[in-house]
Amino acid sequence: MKIVNMEVILQNKALRKGEKMTKEEFLKKLSDCVVDMEEDSVVDVAKEYIQAGYDPLDGMLNGLVDGMKRASQLFDEEEYYIPELLVCSDAMNNGIEEFKKTSAGIE
């Protein structure tokens, strides 16, 4: 059974009501998806981020990578172990793949 992050659900409901998120809110949400092991939600957030017109590279570096750094910190604190890090890395890679779709040809 997968634990659902209530913050992500509430933010998604806010988006459906037409409220716009700031870039910083998107970056936090991307980071949270990684550290919370939200492998599927991260793709939706990445799509929303791109649709909002924000830079995919910033999303990767300041959102997804930040989430992996936070997961690494939890590993150092012995709250996360190797299996959790692997799921976090899967979430990060899912987000990166979504960003790569829009960044094709940009190096």
Image (cartoon, rainbow, N blue to C red):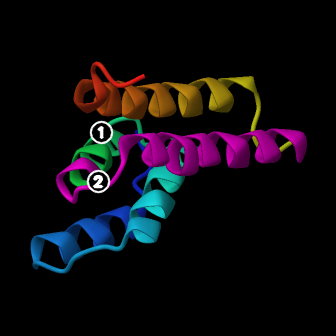
Q: Residues within 10 Å of mark 1 (few under 14, many from 20)?
A: many
Q: Amino acid at mark 2?
A: Tyr
Where is residue 12, by image quadrant?
Answer: bottom left
* Residue beneath disc 2: 49
Q: Depth check: give the residue in front, 59 or 4.
A: 59
What kind of element bears circle 1? helix
Q: Which residues are magenta?
A: 49-77
Instruction: Give how far apart the Cα atoms at labels 1 and 2 are.
Output: 10 Å
11 versus 87 height, above or below: below
Q: Position of residue 68 (x, y in %)?
A: 64, 39
The C terminus - image quarter: top left
Instruction: In the displayed orientation, state which residue is furthest to the right.
Output: 77
55 versus 92 height, above or below: below
- 39 left or right of 72 in image: left
Image point (24%, 25%), residue name: 101
Image point (36%, 63%), residue name: 8
Q: Position of residue 39 (x, y in %)?
A: 40, 35
